[in-house]
Image (cartoon, grey):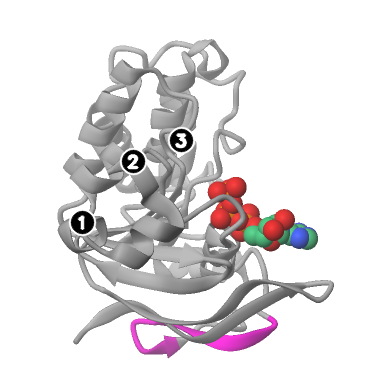
Amino acid sequence: MSYVFKTDGLTRRFSGFTAVNNVSIEIPEGGVRTIIGPNGAGKTTFFNLLSGLLPPSEGRIFFRDRDITALHAYQRARLGIARSFQITNIFGHLTVGENVRLAAQAVHDGKANFFFPGSRMDQVNETTERVLHDVGLWDARDARAENLSHGDQRRLEIGLVIASDPPMLLLDEPLAGMSPTETHETVDLIQRISPGRTILLVEHDIDVVMSISTTITVLQTGQILATGTPAEIRGNEAVQRAYLGELV
Ligand SMILES: Nc1ncnc2c1ncn2[C@@H]1O[C@H](COP(=O)(O)OP(=O)(O)OP(=O)(O)O)[C@@H](O)[C@H]1O
């Protein structure tokens, strides 16, 4: 099977505490894979290991057959592994359009590049426009980013991530703090940008998880408890005992 990510015995310890414990997983190309689990199960640590924010204590990580274990986060980003950073990436004093334009410009060399030929400028303009439409912020393009609602800032953040057209997106709790309307719009956005990409999500909203995921992986105390379709996970007794309880 072709996979985007494969981990082999991935382990991360913090001063003797094992947050991710010997996780071996293959994430196939395409679809939405959601990681769920109780608080402290190791979901964010697992994300940080995949995106290169944290080095593993043990184990290896492969991206499309390439061993990326030793690569830095920026090197992984250049391979097309994009991760959202929960608004911290947004420049509040710039407009929404300027934020997206900077992300579109930064695509090739990993840093903002203000000097390039006209043909590249056309590409940047095109990408900026497409992303603003994709994330539903075209009408807000001239607003300062800091004046957006929380939900719109989260959507802008997703826009910055997709500006580089990455094949692999890691979204850590993209719905956190959103109103029901914002949640609905953002779920819709994730579904619209998912064709042709692999999306890896950490999400707590179990209704959203069940409706949006192709496959769900359940982590518990740093280990994989189960992997399956939403229906399989819903019907899994071990998962119900450990986590879902009366939620489903
Ligand atoms: N930098 C760190 N130093 C020490 N312990 C850490 C560190 N990062 C995470 N941990 C611990 O590792 C465990 C897993 O944390 P992690 O944030 O990965 O869990 P999570 O499943 O994402 O939880 P939540 O759903 O609450 O966000 C927790 O017990 C946490 O306290």
Can residue 163 be seen here? The reply is no
Relative height, residue 26 to residue 95 (above, below):
below
Return the mark for residue 230. 1
Can residue 69 be seen here? The reply is yes
In the rendered image, which quarter contains the C terminus? top left
Residue 222 position in % (x across, y down):
57, 70
Query: Do the CB atoms of the residues marked 3 and 2 lie less than 8 Å apart?
Result: no
Query: Do the CB atoms of the residues marked 3 and 1 lie less than 8 Å apart?
Result: no
**As shown in the figure, which amino acid type bears the numbered disc 1?**
Pro
Q: Which residues are magenta?
A: 57-66
Q: What residue is disc 2 on?
A: 247
Other residues around mark 1 within 10 Å, as few (<14) / some (14–19) / many (≥20):
some
Magenta residue check for 63: yes
**The one of 82 and 101 positioned closer to us in this rendering:** 82
Residue 49 position in % (x across, y down):
58, 69
Q: Residue furthest right?
A: 15
* Dot in front, 1 or 2: 2
Relative height, residue 66 to residue 30 (above, below):
below
Other residues around mark 3 within 10 Å, as few (<14) / some (14–19) / many (≥20):
many
**As shown in the figure, which amino acid type bears the numbered disc 3?**
Glu
Q: Earlier in the sequence, mark 3 or mark 1?
A: 3
Q: What residue is disc 3 on?
A: 157
**As shown in the figure, which amino acid type bears the numbered disc 2?**
Leu
Q: Main secondary structure of the magenta part?
A: strand
What is the spatial separation of the Cα atoms under label 3 and label 1, in whole angstroms?
27 Å
- Residue at position x 49%, y 38% in the image: 102
